[in-house]
Amino acid sequence: MRLASLGSGSKGNGTLVCAGDLLVLVDCGFSLRETERRLAALGLSATDLAALLVTHEHGDHVRGAGALARKYKTPLYSTFGTARAVTGKAAGFHGADWREVRPGRTFELADMTVTPVTVPHDALEPCQYRFSWRQRELGVLTDLGSLTPHVVDAYRECDALVLECNHEPELLAAGPYPASLKRRGGGGPYPASLKRRVGGNLGHLSNQQAATLLGHCNVDRLQHLVLSHLSEQNNTPDHALGWIHQAVEAGRERIRVASQEQGFGWLDIH
């Protein structure tokens, strides 16, 4: 079993999970052309994908999903709420081979078991995913604003974990207005409403919250821990690693940070 990333951050997300000959993509937050380019950089084609799993309807996770699924006839999995929320956004999932997933109800892709996990996020019916294959457990956990007992239990025992470390609260409080949201003039600080959204219970995990989760997990079991979805404005790798190193004191070579531009290369789970 192994994993890789096409990129991670507010401009687009995509995580590859490979189990034997089975290859799936979790989220497709880049345009179709950019997704194809990033796959090619890893020596892959979209024709290699057996399935596309979507976590929720926000653009940085779903931007190219419908187009990819239609072009390559790739089965597309999401909750009903996500599919409904995507309706009307360009072509949405219309024309794709869409298949419903239900949070908490496992399903099989070849001989890999997939568990959709309900998370608190400001989307219609968001979920994250855990993958089981030959006694190995891989967790993908991004885009949630708070830790629930359900989330902790779902990700407590993993051999590899892709974990959101979105922001540092102090940087968020003083953060600049993001260039992507500028309209007229020279930008300025984040609007208070955006700060409340990002830092709220339905927003994104802070570095401290991610470290708290790890305090409840069997970190000795982790072969790989990837810090993901870092805000370009409100976080830095040093801030994220500083908190995570407090929770994972030994084996820090297992920890890496996913980048927006390059994601991360293949990591093998033994």
Image: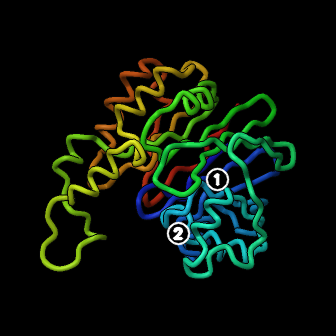
Residue 264, relative to residue 95: is it above or below? above
Residue 185 in percent (x, y) is at: 13, 77
Looking at the image, can residue 71 be seen?
no
Label drawn at residue 30:
2
Residue 166, relative to residue 62: is it above or below? above
- According to the picture, the residue beneath numbered tag 1 turns out to be 16
Locate the N terminus and report the quarter of the image it occupies: top right
Label drawn at residue 171:
none
- Which structural element holds mark 1? strand
Residue 177 in percent (x, y) is at: 21, 63
Residue at x 82%, y 49% (from the top left corner): 109
Three-letter amino acid code at the position of disc 1: Leu
The total of numbered circles placed on residues is 2
Residue 169 in percent (x, y) is at: 25, 40
Along the line of sight, the residue nearer the viewer: 65 or 93: 93
Residue 199, relative to residue 94: is it above or below? above
Residue at x 28%, y 70% (from the top left corner): 181
Mark earlier in primary sequence (2, 1): 1
* C-alpha span from label 2 to label 1: 14 Å
Along the line of sight, the residue nearer the viewer: 67 or 223: 67
Q: Horizontal placement of 167 versus 135: left or right?
A: left
Q: Residues within 10 Å of mark 2 (few under 14, many from 20)?
A: many
Q: Residues within 10 Å of mark 1 (few under 14, many from 20)?
A: some
Residue at x 59%, y 64% (from the top left corner): 28
